[in-house]
Amino acid sequence: MPNEALTRAFDAADELEITVVGRRSGRQISLPVWFVRDDDRLLLIPVHGSATAWYKNVRHDPTIRVAASGARLTTRSRPIDDPDEVRDAVDRFRAKYGSDTFDEYYPQHDVAIEVPLTEIA
């Protein structure tokens, strides 16, 4: 169960910063992404779907750091490629950001990422 300060911070943000490990370079790579909080997890959709570099990095090493509004969490992500789960994530993104905006910025949405709001040891 995530702590209250963490959920408040993510609820107050429209985007967050993720940090992943480059699958070739081994370097930490940070970038802003849109997200949806769903109870005790975050859902992310890579802009270019499964062709997105950071998605490929997460497939290689699922460790991810997410940060927003002063809160930070390092955890293990779970790639989602089940069509029903991806569709659910897409529906949640459309509800949060608007269908037109989502469709404009996300031309490919064949995958998603689940980020549990539980710190790894």
Image: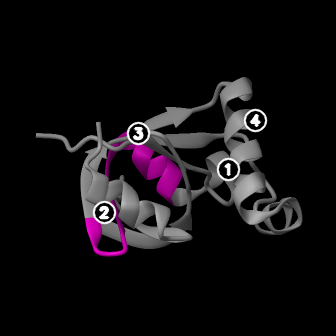
Foreground residue among 68 and 23: 68
The first of marks 4 and 3 along the sequence is: 3
Q: Residue at x 79, y 62 (%)?
A: 102
Kindly indicate the quadrant of the structure image that contains residue 69. Answer: bottom left
Q: List the residue tagged with mark 4.
A: 87
Q: List the residue tagged with mark 3.
A: 40
Residue 25's label in the rendered image is 2
The first of marks 4 and 1 along the sequence is: 1
Q: Which residues are magenta?
A: 54-71
Picture coordinates of residue 18, whole percent (x, y): 40, 63
The answer for how far apart the CA atoms under marks 2 and 1 are is 21 Å
67 relative position to 92: left or right: left
Residue 49's label in the rendered image is 1
Q: Are marks 2 and 4 in contact (CB under 8 Å)?
A: no
Q: Are marks 4 and 1 in contact (CB under 8 Å)?
A: no
What's under tag 2, amino acid-wise? Ser
Helix, strand or loop under label 4 = helix
Whether residue 27 is visible here, answered yes or no, is no
Picture coordinates of residue 121, whole percent (x, y): 10, 40
What's under tag 1, amino acid-wise? Gly
